[in-house]
Amino acid sequence: MATAATMANRLRYELGDIGRSFVHQFVADGTTNRFLVPYSPLDGLYLAINVDGVDVSADVEVEEATGHIVFDTTPAAGDVVIVAGNYFKYFTETEITQYICDAFAQHVTFHTDSYGRTITMATLPAVEEYPVIINASTLALYTLATDASFDIDIQAPDGVMIPRSERYRQLMQMIDVKKNQYKELCSQLGIGLYKIDVFSLRRISKTTNEYVPVFEPQEIDNKSPKTRVRIPIPTYGNVKPTPTTVVQDLNVYEGDAYEFSIRLDFEVNNLTPLAQIRSLPGAAVVFAEFTVTKPNITEDGDNQRTLVLSLTGAQTRLLPGKSYYDVQLTDTDNVTHTYVSGIIFVTKEVSL
């Protein structure tokens, strides 16, 4: 399963922007709280700062791009400051993550899986991870090329010439190579920005505007039940509004008990939960209702923010192949707010 962090590490390997460790020591002058570390960009999250043997990392603001550190309290004159951590060659962690997110969004635009669900980074097929890395590296190289475009050639009176613009040309050549590499992979695999979407080969009923099911062909003497073909559903350019809830789809096996937890950003002790399952939002019939429990409160009070939702095996047998649910919380003033919603996909059981 891909994450933004693992993809960011792979992008750094692709760009040759691997983190390097350093230790820098200097003596404070007692007048300024802003110092320049001669390494940048910095990995501010794991930067360790020590003043006369005392760790003050939490009390220092780090400007990752420039390498400056700013103390909340000015160190006294003569204090020995030791800064240790990692630095990179080109990009900060924030910039690398942004390139990954932008490349991923471009790669999966208007594409869904076989159930019609929007593809997330967690559900991205493994074979598509590297093309996303290639696309992200192209975006990163464009940034470097923009910076290099401001360099001009230097020609000295003695005839010595420094062609600084050559760096820009080399970057643009590398961008062309990466773009062609991404295009070739996407064209061969049928994915990403160069995927060919077919809209006219699947029939739609003129009376109901519903897809006509497609089944796998089988031999004439094969009397087993037909297998439905799960074809990715195109969006037809439809742009869905941004949901106001946290969207979490569930995969349930028919006849099996099911349980999952929701971690919220606030305490739920005084809130009344309600979570129902219906065929469609607004449908009159309730297929099942989640049993919502609040775990025993631990010493640190962490479970005060957790809800556990569960279904019995008998309840999951009542669910259709696809249904909808949401989780509502009502406070003591009888004000209700919906925090989580999604689709439940049910896999039919074999052993009854």
Image (spheres, rainbow, N blue to C red):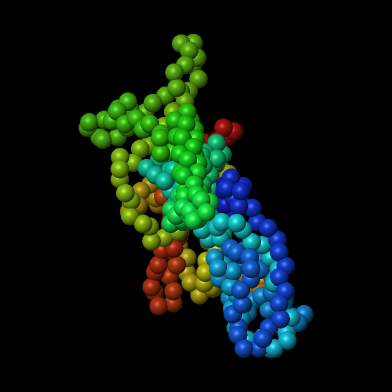
- Nearer the observer, 219 or 312: 219
Q: At which x and y percent is residue 168? A: 47, 48
Considering every residue shown, the one lying at the far top of the view is 221
Would you identify the image quadrant in which residue 210 lies?
top left
Q: Residue at x 68, y 79 (%)?
A: 56
User: On screen, 295 above or below 132?
Assistant: below
Q: Residue at x 34, y 41 (%)?
A: 235
Q: At which x and y percent is residue 175? A: 47, 42
User: On screen, 295 above or below 114?
Assistant: below
User: On screen, 23 above or below 169?
Assistant: below
User: On screen, 249 above or below 51?
Assistant: above
Q: Quadrant of the C terminus?
A: top right
- Nearer the observer, 159 or 63: 159
Q: Quadrant of the N terminus?
A: top right
- Nearer the observer, 168 or 75: 168
- Nearer the observer, 2 or 274: 2
Q: At which x and y percent is residue 64? A: 57, 67
Residue 286 visible in rendering: yes
Residue 287 visible in rendering: no
Considering every residue shown, the one lying at the far front of the view is 158
Q: Residue at x 45, y 55 (%)?
A: 152
The tally of labels here is 0
Considering every residue shown, the one lying at the far left of the view is 207
Q: At which x and y percent is residue 226? A: 46, 23
Q: Residue at x 40, y 78 (%)?
A: 333
Q: Is residue 32 left or right of residue 171?
A: right
